[in-house]
Amino acid sequence: MIKPIYGLMAEFDNPTSLVNAARAAREKGYRRLDAYSPFPIEELTDALHLHHNKLPLIVLCGGILGGLTGFLLQYYITVIDFPINIGGRPLDSWPAYIIITFELTILFGAISAVLGLLGLCGLPMPYHPTFNVPRFALASRNRFFLCIEARDPLFDHDQTSAFLETLEPREVSEVAN
Amino acid sequence: MTAQSRDFAASAELASDLRQWRTRALTAGVIGAVLLLVGIFLVSPFQLYESYLWSYVFYVGVTLGCLVWLMLQYLTGGAWGVVIRRPAEAAARTLPLLALLFLPIVVGIPNLYQWSHANLVANDPVMQHKQIYLNVPFFLIRAALYLGGWNFLAWYFNRWSAREDEGSPVAHRKMAALAGPGILFWGFSITFMAVDWVLSLNPRWFSTIFGMLFMAGQGLSGMAFLITLLVLLSYRRPMSEILTPRHLHDLGKLLLCMVMVWAYFTFSQFLIIWAGNLPDEITWYVARLHGGWRYIALALVLGHFALPFALLLSRDLKRNFKLLAGIAIFILCMRYVDVYWLVAPDFSRGRFAVSWMDFVAPVALGGIWLWAFVTQLEKRPLMPLGEPNLEEALQHGRE
């Protein structure tokens, strides 16, 4: 029995080829693909259509939750749990709550950004099939990789391999699972 | 396409648009000015000076906001700075006109400022102590210093920018060298300006963050104006081929940041005075949070902060030219309401009174100011030809 592979990986010399390859793969209809580069490439985000992810929504929810926590925490203490008359002001003197509300909004927003990022990226990830390709270590030095995953509905070993060859990579390799 | 092969002069269509804007602005300005003069007899000379003062403070804010963004971009760099350079330079070149337009305030000092009346000062120990600072000759000397300093900065940055176009290799360094000290001068001069022109309307009250409110306000007004203008220019060549959503996105982020800075300073002042609740200080807010003024205050919280803040969070909105310009225009309107709310309650002694001249004054001054601005904008190509980062800025947001 043949063990199913993770996908096919093409290796490129320079970022421009990688961006062009990613764009071509998108145009061809591939959706489950990812690119690996030693440094961030802004155009790649456009080429892979990675702009719209759920992270902003997670941060927004975190921020709102933090704001509510900060406000209600102070409201509970000063109005319900331990009411004290301070300078004749009403118990629920909301202007005084704003600073803590603001700080907790930022704190919760920032924490949800970090956790959301880790969660959406699937981190921590002790194993990833791409490292089965020996040359993949160069992705953190001077090589650029595009990987089309076998999960892609359009994926077909021979056709996808032939397609990647048309992009003029240095090498196309199978990624074992 | 390289920068050298491009023509950044206004296209024929744009030149005709600009002529039309200029004529319309001047017409509105002249009609407004005539109405204001009629208002002296229909309402009162007091109302004229009051309406004029806050309109003037507002347009000085738009102009200096442009000037400070111009200086800032020499320090930070960035494509956003390159695309706003020419409009900001043109706005700075209206400062000689604004210096001239200060004259009505000089004439109106007795109508505007209590501390200019010897008999009022004689009966008020607080004003007596402040007289060493708040007196007419020193007030005029300080105003001359601010206006002179701003005009010098405007002249300096425009002169070297023109030299840079001609190929001067030292121009950019010269401008970067004065940008830092220029921003410092701006910060100090705005603090004193806010105290002199606005805060001293109520000589018994003080707030050390007051100048900051105006700095944030000016930065916000300047950015909102520049965004509106760029979007208007983006319909015609050459700007239609230059501006990308990336440029607008960057400017939109700065707009959002200034909305937050304004809210931060404004709330800081409120919180400290509200928490202290001392008779000397709280009266300023009592006058501004009761009667009809409370609705204006509420409108500021919602319209000057909450709504633009919530909308500008969206990435797609900041990249949409028309929507971003819509918000920028709305913010400019709220800026005027904010200046009005800071100034007007001191005149009406807490009573809520809005005169028709409060609506005519910004149109009159704004018309004349816009006329001067467009006249200056027409004089130079719309992009800085000698800018070292021009090519990079043109490629910003392109493949």
Image: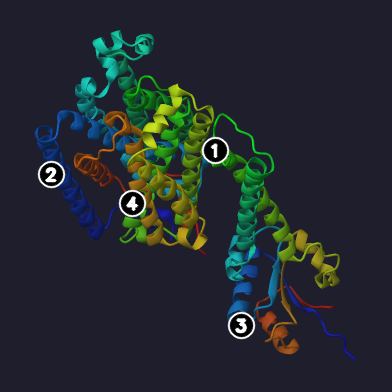
The kind of secondary structure element at disc 4 is helix
Residues at marks 3 and 2, common chain? Answer: no
Colour convention of the picture: rainbow
- Residue B229's label in the rendered image is 4
For residue B260, side relative to residue B293 (left or right):
right
Q: Nearer the viewer, residue A176 or B137?
A: B137
Disc 2 marks which residue? B31
The amino acid on which the numbered mark 1 sits, given as a three-letter code, is Pro
Q: Residues within 10 Å of mark 3 (few under 14, many from 20)?
A: few
The amino acid on which the numbered mark 2 sits, given as a three-letter code, is Ile
Numbered disc in front, either 4 or 3: 4
The kind of secondary structure element at disc 1 is loop
Q: Are marks 3 and 2 in contact (CB under 8 Å)?
A: no
Q: CA distance from mark 3 to mark 1?
A: 63 Å
Chain to which mark 4 belongs: B
The kind of secondary structure element at disc 2 is helix
Residues at marks 3 and 1, common chain? Answer: yes
Q: Position of residue B113 (x, y in %)?
A: 27, 21
Q: Earlier in the sequence, mark 4 or mark 2?
A: 2
Which residue is at a point 12% across and 32% down the rendered structure image?
A: B40
